Image (cartoon, rainbow, N blue to C red):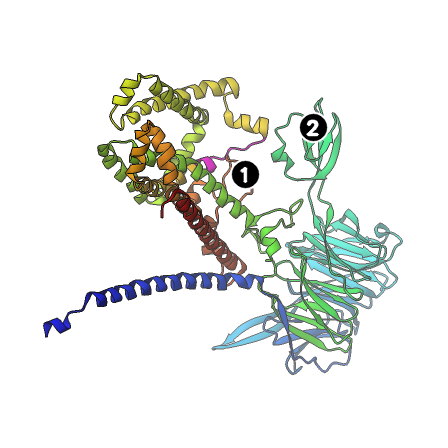
Amino acid sequence: MRRRLEASPQTWNRLARWVITSGGVLLILAVLAIVAFIAREAFPLFGKSHVTAEDSRSPAVRSSALAAGIDDDRDLAFEVHPHATVFFRIADGETITTRPHPFGNGVAATCARFDARRGALVLGSADGRVAYGNAEFDVRWDGEKRVVVPALRWRGTAVLDSTGAGLEDATGDRDEDGRLAFVGRTTPGHVRYVATDESGTPTGRLDLTPQVGSVPATSLLLSLHAALLAVGSADGTVYVWQLGDPAAPHLEDHIRVTPDTITALGLLLGDQTLVAGTSRGDISSWLRVRYVIAKNESEVPVRVDQQMLAPGQEATMLDRDYGRRLGHIPGLRFRTAGQPWTHVHDFGRHPGPIVAIAAGPRGRTFVTADALGHLRLQHATTCRTLVEVVVDGTEPRAPAFAPKGNGLAALSDGQRLHVWGVENPHPETTVASLFRPTWYEGYAEPKHVWQSTGGSDEFEPKLGLVPLLVGTLKGTFYALLFSVPIAVFAALYLSQLASPGLRTAVKPIIELMAAMPSVVVGFLAALWLAPLIESHLGATAGALGGLPLGLVLAVAAWYALPRRMRLAARPGVELAFLVPFLLGAVWAGASAGGPLEAAWFGGDLKQWLFDRHGITYDQRNCIVVGIALGFAIIPIIFTISEDAMAAVPPSLRTAALALGASRWQSALHIVLPAASPGIFAAVMLGLGRAIGETMIVLMATGNTPILDFSPFNGMRTMSAGIAVEIPEAPHGGTLYRVLFLTGFLLFTFTFLLNTVADVVSRRLRKRYGQF
């Protein structure tokens, strides 16, 4: 009976095979599941935006509407009519409340503008007056029921045209001190400007018509907080005034945008991007870009990028950070030349003349409308059209966003309010914006930039991944440059030349290095090693220069010994002979570094690097990272390389020694090539560890995402970027998904490295006969 219960060896083999196979399959499935999850979270970045038309009805008012707006949930809306503003339900057109205009005496409004970014509503009247107010949708709670209560609060009025001429167009806003500024275009074609204080008393009045010239003004624009005023004309010129003092506008610039008539203007959030629309349907964007005047005050020609400046010559050019990059050149001086508006992008042409441009309340999206009924949702930075809709083939008027940008409304000639739900989660991300230079606000040219957060809601995230990619490659390169020679030659010496006792003592110590927490290594690199190297930069350079010299002297001294002594030496004595030379060379180089720094570099090597070559030395830089990260990956490369060299058949070494080769020749020319598949695999594993390392590069690099190949600057790697940014990334937001895309790129990069390592290792095994 007992024999029947005992399993046969074949049964145990089948069970073991099943368990091992199941474990391998489950491991593969787990990895694939992780990759699928990362991809699922990242790939919505490249999804298309779309809008959904919603059923809507306008209130039963016979007059034509001048402007309109909606709330975030697209439940309530308002329309501005000549004598009142009507709030109503979108679904059935039921009127909730009606608010009269502040003009009184039956004076009708002739024009109106609504900006969802601040809820600002501006009215112009038939007798030359303007009014500023805020249309709001207040949210209240009645128990557990959410109630939206519309409100219209008038902040002030002013007389724009004292002659009583009617206004064809008007706009205005309030600054942070409560002062109001208005600009309007009257029926005779005059452009009037007026500013008031907090109490509504006029503080400044100006007729801008002479400054615009004899060409009629066709469009008006006033920025948020009344900081900037722009007027477009029929000859394609935009005139821009600065309103630092609202009572005294200063004409800052005039821009020749197009030979056609400018029919609409828009200023995006942040007041740095101007959008112009023309009678031909063209759309262009303009940025305020810094320019500098470079002057050569030296007696020799000086090259500034592609331009050669003769002595005494000066030139105006884009400010490509010349003050930092070229400030060390004697006699070359830079001074600011202002921030003129510079053409950046042209968008796709509309089928008809542009009639309106509305800036989005968040980000750099805006909507353009033409006279043939086409509305396009566009993004200024990426220069792409996100979505297009057609309004019954009629001219859409007064397009307006919902306060959070998730809805859009527009009036049509049929006096119907059209409402759309907008799903536009990641308009700022494309393959080009992630991996190619992008022209952001405040920059003189397209650049690779990573800057995910800013100090205000007007900040535009800059999520270029190239600085993180370059930072990862920089850190990995310097880590391998430091660790591979040390680890491989240490493994070669211990496996082939050292005595068994020395091998037994040293190998466990090196392997124990892998147990040191990476946070401790990063801590020591940041707070001890980095300041030490900075304060003794000349001595460090001398010590590094002394290492190869010490090695050469040690080898020369070894071979200068009599052959009999070298052959009689016990295995491992070479190390005892080599170490004193290396230590002596390092000490001599470090000792000579200070005097050499004083004699050749003016006593300050860091300042000399900047003065002569424009190189800035950061305390936490690639050299520090290379040493710290190299220290962390030495155990991996050493252990696998030593095992590979120890596995080389002893017959190969014996045959080489029998043919008269020395132990060093045997190790270098026989063992090293034979073990190359394992050494290559070790280097690849070390490379993978360096790419994925987080804490060391996070603490020892300064964590600055700059695109610079200098070894004296810091950087930010992809893994460090994920660690730093993920706590601040809103779930499902653009930054959140870009970080998942970064993780996907890390996984893909590591997978490709492992694949290449396996292919190369197989070919090396085949070449050297190790199967």
Disc 2 on helix, strand or loop?
strand
**Main SS category, magenta section:** loop
On the question of residue 37 being in view, the answer is yes
Which sits earlier in the primary sequence, circle 2 or circle 1?
2
Q: Is residue 201 left or right of residue 26?
A: right
Q: Is residue 407 left or right of residue 585?
A: right
Q: Which mark is residue 620?
A: none
Q: Is residue 357 left or right of residue 729?
A: right
> What residue is shown at x 48% (from left), y 45% (from top)?
472
Image position, residue 728 (x, y; %): 48, 55
Check disc 2 and give the amino acid type.
Val
Label 1 packing within 10 angstroms: few (<14), some (14-19), many (20+): some
Image position, residue 123 (x, y; %): 74, 66
Residue linked to disc 1 = 709
Is 620 contained in the magenta span? yes
Q: Which mark is residue 302?
A: 2
Q: Nearer the viewer, mark 2 or mark 1?
A: 1
> What residue is shown at x 66% (from left), y 70% (from top)?
408
On the question of residue 621 being in view, the answer is no
Given residues 65 and 752, the one toward you in this image is: 752
Q: Which residues are magenta?
A: 614-624
Quadrant location of the N terminus in the rendered image: bottom left
